[in-house]
Image (cartoon, rainbow, N blue to C red):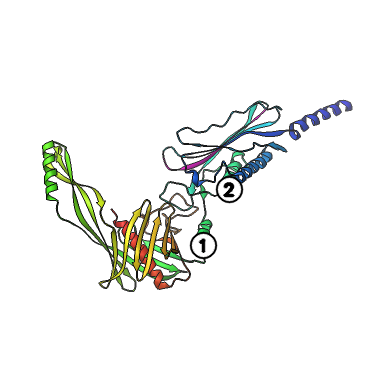
Amino acid sequence: MSSMKSKILFLFLLFYSGTVFSQNAVIQSFDHAARWVNEKNFPSFASNKYLQDTLLLLTSEALKRKFNVKEMSLPNEIAYKYYTGFGKPKIKSLKKAADSRDYNIAILSFITRDTYNSKVYWNMEIVVQQNGAVSFSNQTGHELENFAPSINSELEPINESEFIRVFSVLMDELLDSTKKSSEKIIIGSQESIEDSISIAIPNAVKLKMITNGNFMANSKFSVSVEKEQKILSNVVYSRGKESSKGKGNFSGWLLANATSAALGDNSSSSYMKKTRETRTGNLEFSTGEIHVLKMEWEQNTEKEVVNDADNDGLIATRTGYSEQLSPMIIQIIKNDSLYGNLTYFKEGEIFAVEGEIQNHTINVTYAPSSSVLRVIENNETIVIVEMYNVNPENPDSFSGNKKSNKIFFPPTKSKLPEWYNVYVANNINQADTANYMEAIFCLFFGIGNHT
């Protein structure tokens, strides 16, 4: 009897050692793909040996822990492909292993923009075979979102360390090491933003810009600038007058009228009318000072003359597109004297003003894609404003923990103030800071009146 037990024990140990300690794992295929995203915003995958080796090592260690194997056979590289059309990658079929007890593994990683909107997702999939059958399979994925809000749909650039971090999160979920989550994965952090700001403005002084009202829509708003809860300046903007003056293009109107009448119902003809546009606004400071902002430019406006069949053939004139003919000049007037003179313009996605305020030659740029506003003087960045609301009490505010209500331009339905972080060079005095802030107000004024 004892001899029989010994044989059974021997066979059990032989089987156990063969199934547990002699098992190996082979990654037969490991693919990474991207579709409809800017490749420049991700590390150069195919040629980056350090990144590939790091991801392979992370994957190997995670699989060893998951399947309790000591030997892991890895591919020489992670295959990469970029898709430009509607096609998308599929995880590759596995070949039968030489030893049926071994684990054969296929992994697919895929970054893509959504088919119907600008959201970006990173998905991962794994299939594991043993004894000729699938013993484990799983999928996971997350939407990727910029830490700093932006009106640009494009994801901010991801560096190597950020790429590895996100990959590790997905791999842990894929292998059930951590619980799956439906949360978005945030790219970047406040710390990384402040690190980049410290490079542009070493030892910057941090201020807070507190606003009430939509300051980019040429409507009434107020702004306070604080340092350590002490108010440095306070200003209220109110909308002024606007006018459009020009000579009537009578001959153009007459010809368009005659053409529309001759062509019959629902026909139209157009002519151009040249006008000089003027917009004004007032900045009232807590000191009682009032500065008048005045923006002027010339433009051609299309006037379309329509033979309206639905209105008994009445000839009606409609306004079409406008063509700017001259620079948009913004003047700051204080006590009937010229205090500042700037030009507003937009190049691509960049809004900007440049010119002089009290002997300071200033350039202010705002790039919605990066949520950053910069004030530059003598080719040196003097002020940086993070253009997203960080007031935690405001339901429309943005924070790393509350992404769904992030705000790009301030409208806002909330009547609570909005907070914006401002970084100023530490050698700038309060008077100069006020001039730089006024240049920023001029940019807001230009954006609000730009047609």
Disc 2 + disc 1, Cβ < 8 Å: no
Residue at 46% across, 50% down: 403
Which of the numbered marks, if any, corresponds to residue 165? 2
Tag 1 residue: 198
Q: How many marks?
A: 2
In the image, residue 80 lies in the stretch drawn in magenta: no
**Residue type at the position of mark 1:** Ser
Residue numbers of the magenta segment: 117-130
| Left or right, 68 with reference to 202 | right
The amino acid type, in three-letter code, at marker 2 is Arg
Q: Is residue 65 above or below residue 349?
A: above
Give the mark nearer the N terminus: 2 vs 1.
2
Q: Which residue is nearer to you in this view: 326 or 241?
A: 326
Q: Position of residue 289 (x, y in %)?
A: 31, 72
Residue 449 position, x and y percent, is 29, 57
Residue 388 visible in the displayed image: no
**From the image, which quarter does the N terminus lie in?**
top right
